[in-house]
Amino acid sequence: MTTRRHPTLVAALLTLALAAAAAPPQPPLPHVVILATGGTIAGTAASSTATVGYKAATVGVAELIAAVPELASVARVTGEQVFQIASENMTPAHWLILARRVNELLARPDVAGIVITHGTDTLEETAYFLDLVVKSEKPVVLVGAMRPATAISADGPMNLFNAVALAASPEAVGRGVMVCMNDRIDAARDVTKTSTVALDTFRSPEVGELGLMERGRPVFYRATTRLHTTATEFDVSSLKELPNVGIALAYAGSGRLEIDALAAAGVKGIVNAGVGDGSLSIEAKAALVEARKRGIVVVRASRIAGGPVVRDGEADDDALDFVVADNLSPQKARILLALALTRTSDTREIQRIFRRY
Ligand code: DAS
């Protein structure tokens, strides 16, 4: 076919070429760094139908990125393999390493946001710790998967795409550390893993998600009222280790066994995951009073997934010099107490901290 016979085609092609040349240059895509730590999102199994009993933390960050070429449509992505572990093995020592790397990267003007790929088992704890110590307004988004990368309908790739798209979004700036799984956007403070197996496991049962991902864009419905990131008083940049805080879970017949063991182990704080509204058995109360007398800070939390522990409700906290956890889960109250103890051992000051974060 020669163009001589199709003058309209030539005109159309010319118009397109001129339009393309005149179009304003597209701004460069935001640079998002993916920090990989392991977990199921990096997991593999011998069979594509295996969704339990697989090996977590085997696929490297380069492979995770290569498996989702669509990332290039929302961000310029680079990756670092910070750890390669199942998150049941994550520790405060790992948190400190991760926090330092996050703060270093976010201080760079060329970095727009960070995604952290992570096992789901303790993802909410790492997220909350970072929410309290990251010193930037830029988005930090944690993401995992409930099915290994080798599974039919693996959830990791879409979760990773959404997490990167969120971290690249200007609307995500200043909202604290977020968790983005199964299209939901949750605040680090409120989110928790609610199912051992369901894809939609990360929920914020009491206060609801911050928003949803829609076609690669965040739609926000609320913002947290609690302090986070640049508004917190916590600085871990030169901290060697976090103060040791333990959790004692209450159950029918639980007495002082776990509490005494924690006290004997030399913890600086005990979070008591009480029954009901943080209720204490007679024995547990006696053990906590003794622990307090040894200078251990006691926080009354609840094993129940929702609602606050009301101060001076099921125990006379004023008289006992205890702190209440507000509506934080025991595992998150432990994180906040550990960071509070880097600032003060004054229980009134610590209670004020639990009201603000
Ligand atoms: N063992 C789990 C973990 O690494 C696997 C996962 O769900 O990510 O948290």
Image: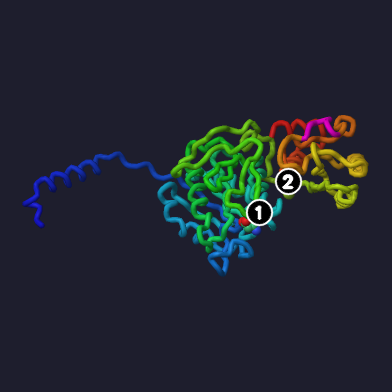
Q: Residue at x 57, y 32 (%)?
A: 222
Which residue sits at x=69%, y=38%? Answer: 234
Between tags 1 and 2, which lies in front?
Answer: 1
User: Mark 2 sits on what residue?
Assistant: 331
Q: Residues within 10 Å of mark 1 (few under 14, many from 20)?
A: few
Give the quarter of the image for residue 326: top right
Image spot of residue 241 (x, y percent): 74, 49
| Image location of residue 210, percent across then percent down | 57, 37
Q: What stretch is highlighted in magenta?
A: 309-314
Q: In which quarter of the image is ligand 1?
A: bottom right
Is 322 on the left-hand or right-hand side of 65?
A: right
Residue 286's disc is none
Q: Pick whichever of labels 1 and 2 is earlier in the sequence.
A: 1
Q: Is residue 97 magenta?
A: no
Residues 183 and 79: in front is: 183
Query: Amino acid type of disc 2?
Result: Gln
Report the coloring of the rendering.
Answer: rainbow
Characterize the local packing of mark 2: few (<14), some (14-19) or many (20 or more) Cα atoms within 10 angstroms: some
Task: Specify the quadrant that holds the C terminus.
Answer: top right
**Image quadrant assignment for residue 26:** top left
> Closer to the camera, 164 or 347?
164
Q: Mark 1 points at which residue?
A: 196
At mark 2, the secondary structure is helix
- Quadrant where the N terminus sits is bottom left
**Which quarter of the figure has residue 54?**
bottom right
Q: Say what amino acid the circle numbered 1 marks.
A: Thr
User: Can the viewer see residue 155?
Assistant: yes
